């Protein structure tokens, strides 16, 4: 433990180190909260990672947490400041999904995970930027301006949870929550040098998450260490009567065996992935990481996932299809953007025209593109050729993973083929942007847990490796990641921001 | 796969989206390109599959269809955002 005095900066604190200091009464939650709120105020002009900052609310939550600590409570998230992606509902607070459609929307209730974090005593500092409705891989499609990467301000932080990733990387909070549908936590974690964890589908409640693709959406943490991800998951995981896709079984203790050695663990490495246009440094870094796992006693086995090449086309049928259905509820009448209704709200106004105006005026180009694609794929005459076929191939992808997990315990892949790209470089090439998710989509379609952890730097920019396990085997992911971070320092490297 | 301008207009109508001429042109090109890429799925043989989509672990869970009360403050927040209302109900134009 390091010695604390009032000049100490809290930049380096993880959940575990902050928790120790709080419990030892060397710092208070109010001090921590003020420190991070000040940083956001001073520095977020450069990044635009936060859409809403909750000054008063955060300080009153911090005071409450300090009271609970003084009464002897000792929960691991008690008094720990965090940020939340702005597609997750907080009662009485603006929740925009980074869309003009919901620019003034006030959430009437808390998401289940927000309730659980509140009970645990975590302190909510504010809401973070994202690609509009989480549609994107760069946080450039937000209606409220793009977010920048603290490692290089001319580059994207990844997406769609780019605001959360950028903020944790810039030390604006100790952890953040994101959502991951096809890589939206893991790719930004890779671009910003963080540990980003996507739980198994059904492990964490989606109640209060603005739906994008209901069959693969999952909420998960972006943290400074893999152990921190396990701590956050422990709090937010478990059955929720408001989301019946959550698993009823008890949530295991993710920290109990996290430090167990990994002797004899079978790691699968997908041979063909190493030839998918990886930057040389990324390829080198992944191979070196495998040697590190080997030195810790793991067995490396070459495997092949031939159906993975179909994961992007499958994803870009299923996702837009569900997007078009999920966003159809947004009509600007009950809530949200209203273009014509007030101005021209006469009885002769055609209803269909009101919907079209409200939606046409307030959705951005990527959202419209996905709604169009999904509506087309689901329309009469094309349904069998696109949606039904995609669902069948998704099943093949799932089966392939299930079979592979008879041979290996975990699979390791790059998190992304490259480091963060330049702002504007890919925004006009939507197909190239869709291919950003090449390593992320497979585990999403199969509902598997996966983490991205830092694995090195290439020309001063971080890149990550991905560890995937079979469904509901998140312990294996954390165990491997923890052991890797115990003997490496990649996760401790910080941007000169 | 080529997609016609008429198809784009038809889909936009189904999706309840106002699109201007530039958007129609853009989406015609972009959707065509994406669908062309997606055509790779034609080469996958799936006739051996016994079921589609839902695995065993995802079987539907059911609950009773009962009305449950919602906290009044949450109802108030929701209703404050309605464009037009009358006595706790959303007021819209006549449909017919």
Image: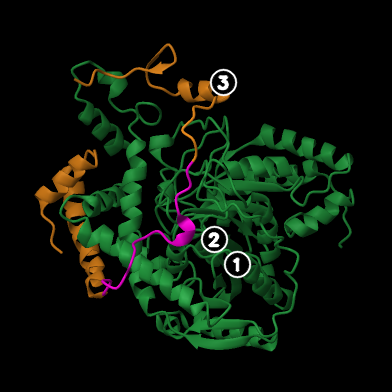
- Chain of residue at mark 2: A
Left or right, A452 with respect to A294, comes to left
Question: Residue drawn at (37%, 44%), measured in percent from left and top?
Answer: A326
Mark 1 secondary-structure assignment: loop
- The magenta stretch spans which residues? B45-62
Q: How far apart are marks 2 and 1 (CA)?
A: 8 Å
Residue to which mark 1 is pinned: A473
Residue A402 image point, x, y percent = 47, 73
Nearest the viewer among A488 and A460 is: A488
Q: Do labels 3 and 2 share a chain?
A: no
Residue A222 image point, x, y percent = 60, 58
Q: Is residue A407 visible?
A: yes
Residue to which mark 3 is pinned: B72
Q: Distance between the residues labelled 3 and 2?
A: 35 Å
Q: Can residue B19 be seen in this view?
A: no
* Circles 2, 1 touching at the beta carbon (< 8 Å): yes
Scheme of colours in the image: by chain
Q: Colour of chain B?
A: orange
- Above or below, A62 against A165 in this view is above
Residue A369 image point, x, y percent = 28, 51
Of the image marks 2 and 1, the number of the one nearer the N terminus? 2
Q: Colour of chain A?
A: green
Residue to which mark 2 is pinned: A200
């Amino acid at each position: 433990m390091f010695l604390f005095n009032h000049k100490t900066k809290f930049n380096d604190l993880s959940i575990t180190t902050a928790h120790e200091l709080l419990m030892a009464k060397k710092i208070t939650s109010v001090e921590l909260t003020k420190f991070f709120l000040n940083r956001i105020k001073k520095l977020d002009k450069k990044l635009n990672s936060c859409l809403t900052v909750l000054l008063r609310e955060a300080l009153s939550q911090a005071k409450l947490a300090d009271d609970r600590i003084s009464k002897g409570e000792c929960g691991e998230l008690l008094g720990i400041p965090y940020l939340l992606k702005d597609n997750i509902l907080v009662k009485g607070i603006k929740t925009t999904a980074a869309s003009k459609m919901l620019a003034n929307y006030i959430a009437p209730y808390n998401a289940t995970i927000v309730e659980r974090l509140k009970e645990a005593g975590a302190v909510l500092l504010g809401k973070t930027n994202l690609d509009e409705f989480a549609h994107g891989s760069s946080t450039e499609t937000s209606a409220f301006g793009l977010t920048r990467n603290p490692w290089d301000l001319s580059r994207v932080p990844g997406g769609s949870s780019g605001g959360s990733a950028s903020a944790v990387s810039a030390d604006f909070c100790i952890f953040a929550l994101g959502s991951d549908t096809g890589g939206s936590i893991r790719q930004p974690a890779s671009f910003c040098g963080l540990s980003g964890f996507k739980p198994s589908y059904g492990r964490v409640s989606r109640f209060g998450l603005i739906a994008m693709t209901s069959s693969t959406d999952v909420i998960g943490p972006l943290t400074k260490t893999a152990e921190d991800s396990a701590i956050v998951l422990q709090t937010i995981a478990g059955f929720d009567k408001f989301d019946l896709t959550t698993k009823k079984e008890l949530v295991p203790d993710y920290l109990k065996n996290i430090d167990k050695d990994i002797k004899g663990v079978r790691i699968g490495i997908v041979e063909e992935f190493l030839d998918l246009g990886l930057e040389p440094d990324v390829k080198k870094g992944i191979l070196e990481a495998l040697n590190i796992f080997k030195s810790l006693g793991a067995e490396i086995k070459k495997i092949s996932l031939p159906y993975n090449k179909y994961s992007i086309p499958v994803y870009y049928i299923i996702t837009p299809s569900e997007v078009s259905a999920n966003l159809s509820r947004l009509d600007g009448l009950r809530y949200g953007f209203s273009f014509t209704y007030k101005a021209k709200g006469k009885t002769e106004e055609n209803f269909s025209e009101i919907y079209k105006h409200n939606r046409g005026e307030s959705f951005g180009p990527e959202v419209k593109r996905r709604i169009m694609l999904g509506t087309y794929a689901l329309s009469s005459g094309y349904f069998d050729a696109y949606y039904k076929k995609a669902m069948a191939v998704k099943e093949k992808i799932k089966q392939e993973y299930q079979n592979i997990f008879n041979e290996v315990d975990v699979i390791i892949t790059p998190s992304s083929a490259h480091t963060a790209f330049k702002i504007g470089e890919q925004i006009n090439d939507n197909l190239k942007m869709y291919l950003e998710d090449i390593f992320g989509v497979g585990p999403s379609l199969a509902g598997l847990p996966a983490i991205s952890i830092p694995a090195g730097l290439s020309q001063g920019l971080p890149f990550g490796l991905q560890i995937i396990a079979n469904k509901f085997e998140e312990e294996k992911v954390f165990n491997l990641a923890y052991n890797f971070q115990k003997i490496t320092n990649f996760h401790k490297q910080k941007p000169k921001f | 796969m080529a997609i016609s301008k008429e198809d784009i207009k038809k889909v936009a109508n189904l999706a309840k989206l106002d699109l201007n001429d530039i958007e129609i042109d853009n989406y015609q090109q972009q959707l065509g390109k994406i669908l062309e890429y997606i055509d790779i799925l034609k080469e996958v043989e799936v006739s051996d599959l016994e079921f589609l989509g839902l695995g065993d672990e995802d079987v539907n869970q059911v609950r009773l269809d009962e009305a449950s009360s919602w906290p009044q403050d949450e109802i108030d927040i929701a209703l404050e955002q309605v464009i037009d209302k009358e006595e706790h109900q959303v007021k819209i134009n006549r449909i017919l």
